[in-house]
Image (tube, helix red, strand yellow):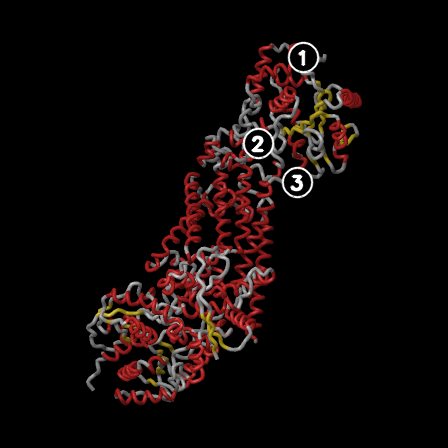
């Protein structure tokens, strides 16, 4: 079995399986923990309105901006570039459509009646490059900043690696970097994605899910008290 | 009538010296060699003793024979082919039955250690009754013939990689020549079928230089299998610009856009189709509007699907996902239950 | 009994790769005669008891962005990374992952998250108690929305269980638990004070009524240091014609159990107030100018009680604002420019953001807001037990500079607040820096500016 066949076949099946198992294990293992009811009299009864914290916390308050603007901007540069490259590049869209078809019996066009647009390759390439640059910037900052250096651990650096690898290998494959055999570059890209999937549930990448839970929890608790959001 | 050398055989057919030299120049070019080597190829071919070639057909569809012998008019390729001493070939030979087998055995004995063995079709390793020739099973026939061969050409994807018979679930236990023969030089010439000029080019190279041409990691001649279809495809600019046909005969298809989305495996397929093309340079699948199916790659039949784009893969199915969800949920519930238990125990004290 | 240990300070190793936990300069206090292993065991058990779904979500969510440091006054004024708020929780986080998280079984089996050591807990005492006022600015900053401040309060439970809290906090909590007040304002002392205050200021102060609509409470800080606040409370209640009382079986609103991490003491102190309110059938319990008193009863009281409280709980500032709103409280014009220092527990954490401002408006004061202000205002630096912990004085004075700068920038004539602990911190800071600005109490301002009806 060639590396590409392995990457497109058993490696993909196992990594998707491990991803699903790990994410559910971690999320349910947390959400099903004991939660004590708050018996205090609320200031605001509609605590659900606090869920707006999920949106609010997406940008710091003006008072906190001075020391945090760099991290926020770089964070968005990375996330936007990464997510656009992931969801709007034609070969990726084809993959997701295939998964949707396999799971739902119809591709997304059939399901929601409208197509899923793709972006021109040039834009994807540019945004991927921006994303990688942002990742490099935040890595440098993590090493140089005394605060981040103190609190960082293996998870921080490894998660960085498994995030940058698919971007870098993806660009390399797309560019047929150095004239290396395409099927090998493609295989590296797929394997790097599989590594990301396998690591995802066990490290800080889970913030993709927990961000809603954490912001939501705090939002509702604070809203109930009328505390500052 | 049999002629001792290739040159004599060609002259007897009325092939002029000029035509012959042109052929040699074209062959040199196709092999990626300098055309200054054309006279050397000419000299070698002219003096070449017609090698004995034994062609063993195993689990094959005869497509390789069809491709290689398909001649629209008297092309030089078919002449070359005829002037080899093809001592055993089911489709082309006149003899049949015992006479054919005796001809084979005699050719092997007379040319032991020097004959060229061409194999097409895969070799079944399951029940030996799956494929036999005159009562002999393929596997032992191959081993016997390989023992006396100078070199072996595994012609077609079946002989090179197992091909269609080896596709999941491989009911006959089909294997490639390389999996059976380990001690002889093997040249894989895959394709389903391979392009005619590829075989003649390989033969010409072998006859000229007396040795196996430069091969890639899958033992395919680099001269013909050194580049991907994608890298030589005339529709490549559309791929780069992200202009794809979404389905057959849609607007994009009619405009001749890239066929990636309808399943073209060009990016990962090594063959000469995009340059040499088929039917004496008439066209090739992509030009005709159908994506490359990757027929010169191992396991091309099992790559999820001809009409599935390359980026889709064997990711599993709803059942694998469903099982994963079940297992993950169970582990999550269990870990939460365990944590709660520890908590109650801590509170109890 | 507390024993105190001092170790030589070890400098932070900036030029080495991060290998292990940085070693801050530390001195730690210990209570009890337990073996190290037992201390850790008790801490772990306490952590496990505390963890619930919300705390677990927070523990799973930190992405080590370090932005919480930018919000913390201790980091801001020292630039020492060890004061990064989430770092204060590091042993707590490790304990969670090892003992309680979804992968706890795996972490324990493969020892991927080593057990918290007693040395770590000792080192962390300073971070959890000296350099955190539980002000909640970090919780307001965190991009993931983690309520770091609440987690620090929870971590203190484990520290207390392990006998590793600052001596002063241990001592005053014991005092509160045994005598009824952390500062010696026992019921007898309180009763005596009320008598001479009533006399001196010619104000009626009801004590131990069997029935009253409103139960008023005070903080020991006011009773002992700012007795004018007691008088002010009485004056205003009488002026408004409220049916109110003090009760000697439940008057102490501060809760050092909460600050120290002693849940049992916290509950005991809370129950005193609740029982007293129930005993006199009060419909409203008014909390004094105090920060953590508000958190302890308004938000945590019912959960300690086990059911919703049968009475309303209000901070005195909320009560005054309500009276202003209802038109019952008419006040003389203050005629001065003021700036308001927001007590963290009442404003940012407690939600009574506008109440003090409504009162200041009623006083006709020209309000010049600080920047950062309201919910994002800087902490006075003395909350959460820090002002009682003398080991932390140096650090606290550093953070106080932020407040002085803020206030001076407004150019206001007088700073006002509605928390006696903040006031105490300001007075101490004022003395230390020989600052010319004095902090005022909103309650006292109101009492001083009542428009008494011609009777």
Left or right: C449, with A27 as reference point: left
Residue B132, given in percent of the width and then of the height, sits at 76, 31
In depth, the one of B139 and A224 nearer the eye is B139
Instruction: Give the mark toward the camera: 2 or 3.
Output: 2
Q: Which residue is mark 3?
A: B168
Q: Earlier in the sequence, mark 2 or mark 3?
A: 3
Gap between marks 2 and 1 measured at Cα = 34 Å
Q: Number of marks in the image?
A: 3
Residue A214, given in percent of the width and then of the height, sits at 45, 61
Left or right: A129, with C366 as reference point: right
Name the residue at 48% across, 43% down: A168
Q: Which residue is mark 1?
A: B9
**Disc 3: host chain:** B
Secondary-structure class at tag 1: helix
Residue B121, given in percent of the width and then of the height, sits at 69, 30
Gap between marks 2 and 3 measured at Cα = 22 Å
Name the residue at 69% across, 26% down: B151
Q: Is residue A122 above or below residue B214?
A: below
Q: Are marks 2 and 3 in contact (CB under 8 Å)?
A: no
Disc on res. C452? none
Q: Earlier in the sequence, mark 2 or mark 1?
A: 1
Secondary-structure class at tag 3: loop
**Disc 2: host chain:** B
Q: Which residue is mark 2?
A: B270
């Amino acid at each position: 079995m060639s590396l590409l066949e392995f990457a497109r076949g058993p490696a993909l099946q196992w990594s998707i399986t491990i991803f699903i198992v790990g994410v559910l294990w971690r999320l349910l293992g947390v959400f099903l923990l004991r939660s004590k009811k708050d018996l205090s009299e609320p200031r605001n009864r509609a605590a659900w309105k606090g869920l707006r914290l999920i949106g609010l916390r997406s940008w710091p308050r003006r008072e906190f901006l001075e020391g945090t603007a760099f991290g926020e901007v770089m964070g968005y540069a990375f996330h936007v570039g990464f997510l656009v490259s992931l969801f709007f590049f034609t070969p990726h869209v084809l993959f997701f459509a295939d998964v949707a078809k396999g799971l739902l019996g119809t591709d997304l066009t059939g399901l929601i009646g409208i197509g899923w647009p793709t972006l021109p390759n040039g834009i994807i390439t540019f945004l991927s490059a921006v994303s990688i640059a942002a990742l490099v910037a935040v890595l440098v900052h993590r090493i140089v900043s005394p605060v981040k250096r103190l609190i960082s651990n293996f998870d921080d650096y490894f998660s960085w690696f498994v995030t940058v690898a698919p971007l870098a290998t993806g660009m390399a494959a797309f560019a047929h970097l150095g004239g290396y055999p395409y099927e090998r570059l493609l295989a590296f890209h797929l394997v790097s994605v599989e590594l990301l999937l396998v690591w995802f549930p066990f490290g800080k990448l889970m913030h993709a899910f927990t961000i809603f839970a954490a912001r939501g929890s705090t939002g509702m608790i604070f809203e109930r008290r009328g505390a500052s959001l | 009538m049999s002629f001792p050398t290739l040159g004599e055989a060609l002259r007897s057919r009325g092939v002029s010296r000029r035509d012959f030299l042109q052929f040699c120049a074209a062959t040199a070019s196709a092999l990626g060699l300098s055309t200054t080597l054309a006279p050397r190829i000419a000299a070698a071919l002219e003096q070449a003793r017609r090698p004995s070639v034994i062609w063993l057909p195993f689990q094959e569809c005869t497509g390789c024979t069809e491709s290689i012998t398909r001649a629209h008019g008297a092309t030089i390729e078919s002449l070359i082919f005829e002037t080899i001493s093809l001592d055993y070939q089911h489709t082309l030979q006149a003899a049949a039955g015992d006479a054919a087998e005796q001809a084979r055995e005699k050719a092997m004995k007379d040319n032991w250690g020097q004959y060229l063995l061409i194999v097409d079709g895969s070799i079944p390793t399951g029940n030996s009754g799956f494929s036999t020739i005159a009562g002999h099973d393929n596997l032992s026939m191959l081993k016997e013939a390989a023992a006396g061969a100078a070199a072996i050409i595994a012609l077609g994807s079946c002989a090179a990689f197992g091909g269609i018979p080896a596709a999941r679930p491989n009911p006959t236990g089909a294997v490639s020549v390389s999996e059976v023969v380990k001690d002889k030089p093997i040249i894989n010439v895959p394709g389903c079928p391979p392009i005619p000029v590829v075989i003649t080019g390989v033969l010409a190279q072998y006859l000229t230089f007396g040795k196996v041409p430069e091969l890639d990691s899958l033992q395919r001649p680099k001269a013909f299998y050194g580049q991907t279809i994608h890298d030589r495809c005339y529709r490549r600019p559309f791929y780069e610009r992200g202009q794809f046909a979404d389905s057959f005969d849609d607007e994009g298809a009619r405009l001749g856009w890239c066929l990636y989305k309808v399943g073209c495996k060009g990016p990962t397929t090594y063959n000469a189709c995009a340059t040499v093309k088929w039917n004496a340079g008439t066209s090739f699948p992509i030009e005709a509007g159908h994506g490359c199916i990757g027929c010169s790659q191992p396991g091309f039949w099992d790559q999820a699907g001809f009409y599935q784009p390359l980026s889709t893969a064997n990711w599993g199915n709803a059942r694998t996902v469903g099982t994963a969800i079940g297992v993950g949920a169970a582990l999550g519930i269990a870990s939460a239950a365990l944590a709660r238990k520890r908590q109650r125990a801590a509170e109890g004290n | 009994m507390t024993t105190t240990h001092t170790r030589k300070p070890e400098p932070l190793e900036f030029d080495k790769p991060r290998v292990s936990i940085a070693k801050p300069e530390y001195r730690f206090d210990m209570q009890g005669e337990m073996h190290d292993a037992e201390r850790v065991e008790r801490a772990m058990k306490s952590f496990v008891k505390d963890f619930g779904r919300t705390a677990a979500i927070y523990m799973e969510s930190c992405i080590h962005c370090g932005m919480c440091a930018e919000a913390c006054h201790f980091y801001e004024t020292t630039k020492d990374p060890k004061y990064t708020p989430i770092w204060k929780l590091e042993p707590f986080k490790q304990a969670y992952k090892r003992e309680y998280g979804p992968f706890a079984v795996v972490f324990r089996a493969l020892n991927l998250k080593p057990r918290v050591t007693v040395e770590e807990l000792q080192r962390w005492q300073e971070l959890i108690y000296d350099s955190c006022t539980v002000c909640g600015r970090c919780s307001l900053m965190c991009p993931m929305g983690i309520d770091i401040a609440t987690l620090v309060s929870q971590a203190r439970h484990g520290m207390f269980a392990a006998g590793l809290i600052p001596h002063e906090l241990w001592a005053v909590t014991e005092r509160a638990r045994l005598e009824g007040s952390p500062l010696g304002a026992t019921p007898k002392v309180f009763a005596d004070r009320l008598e001479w205050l009533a006399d001196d200021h010619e104000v009626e102060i009801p004590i131990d009524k069997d029935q009253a609509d409103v139960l008023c409470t005070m903080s020991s800080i006011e009773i002992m240091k700012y007795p004018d606040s007691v008088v002010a409370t009485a004056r205003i209640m009488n002026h408004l014609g409220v049916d109110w009382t003090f009760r000697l079986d439940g008057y102490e609103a501060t809760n050092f159990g909460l600050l120290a991490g002693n849940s049992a003491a916290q509950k005991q102190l809370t129950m005193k107030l609740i029982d007293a309110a129930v005993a006199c059938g009060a419909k409203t319990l008014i909390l004094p100018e105090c920060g953590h008193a508000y958190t302890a009863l308004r938000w945590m009281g019912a959960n300690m009680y086990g059911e919703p409280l049968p009475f309303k709980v209000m901070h005195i500032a909320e009560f005054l604002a309500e009276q202003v709103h209802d038109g019952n409280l008419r006040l003389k014009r203050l005629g001065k420019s003021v700036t308001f220092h927001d007590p963290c527990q009442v404003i940012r954490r407690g939600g009574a953001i506008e109440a003090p401002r409504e009162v200041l408006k009623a006083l006709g004061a020209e309000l010049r807001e600080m920047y950062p202000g309201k919910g994002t205002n800087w902490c006075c630096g003395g909350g959460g037990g820090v002002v009682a912990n003398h080991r932390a004085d140096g650090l606290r004075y550093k953070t106080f500079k932020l407040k002085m700068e803020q206030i001076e920038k407004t150019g206001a004539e007088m700073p006002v607040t509605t928390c006696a602990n903040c006031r105490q911190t300001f007075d101490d800071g004022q003395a230390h820096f020989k600052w010319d600005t004095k902090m005022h109490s909103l309650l006292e301002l109101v009492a001083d500016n009542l428009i008494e009806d011609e009777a």
